Amino acid sequence: MTAEELIAFEAEVAGHFNAGRIRAPIHLSGGCEEQTIEVFKNIRAEDWVCTNWRSHYHCLLKGVPRERLMADILAGKSITLCYPDFKIFSSAIVGGNLPIALGIALAIKRRGGSERVHVFCGDMTAAAGTFFECTKYAAGHDLPIRFIIEDNGLSVCTPTAEVWGDQIRQPFRPQIVRFSYQSQWPHSGAGVRVQF
């Protein structure tokens, strides 16, 4: 899947949302296509992807058929997309996917499996206690997990550094990847229709 295809998908979702055809929250990706594609070069079909409420790109790059994903989004499932057949789990709770990803990685290690877990979170979540506990446990037990921080510099609509301080941008452990980008969409919705 190309960056252009990802962008076109989100634009289509935005059109549906602004026309009132999606009657549930959505969180769109934009501005991070190349970085996300690069991250997915190291994710195999047998690996797990644990993601958050902004997961459309992750689902598409993991192989979920475009039509199936769009149908689920139109049905109001945008922020809770789970596809066990593609080994994708998402959580709409801030940091809720982290301990689940950790548990999957621990189970893989205990049974001697070869899969890996790739868990995505935003920079706000990366400043929370759950993130530090999970990364510390993963490192301490040498679990097959990689944490990917998608850093758009915002905690909802407030600059993350203003909320949490600049120390969150310090280097992390080797199993943690961070990329920065400028979001093309508002935190929630698509910028035209107001959601209540």
Image (cartoon, helix red, strand yellow):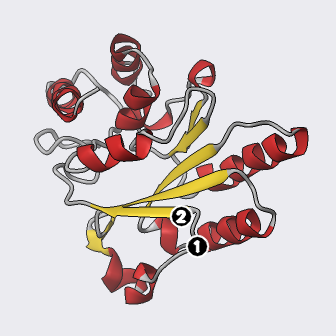
Residue receiving disc 2: 176
Q: Which residue sits at x=61%, y=36%? A: 48
The percent position of residue 165, horizontal first and vertical second, equals 39, 88
Tell me how far mark 1 sits from mark 2, CA to CA. Answer: 6 Å
Residue situated in front as seen by the camera: 78 or 38:
38
| Image quadrant containing the N terminus | top left
Residue receiving disc 1: 173
Tell me the kind of residue under disc 2. Answer: Ile
The percent position of residue 75, horizontal first and vertical second, equals 40, 19
At numbered mark 2, what does the secondary structure look like: helix, strand or loop? Answer: strand
Task: Answer with left or right where residue 149 lies relative to residue 158.
Answer: right
Callouts 1 and 2 close, C-beta under 8 Å: yes
- Note whether residue 96 is visible: no
Label 1: few (<14), some or many (≥20) within 10 Å?
few
The percent position of residue 50, horizontal first and vertical second, equals 57, 42
| Image quadrant containing the C terminus | top left
Residue situated in front as seen by the camera: 75 or 34:
34
Q: Is residue 20 above or below residue 117?
A: above
The percent position of residue 194, horizontal first and vertical second, equals 18, 43
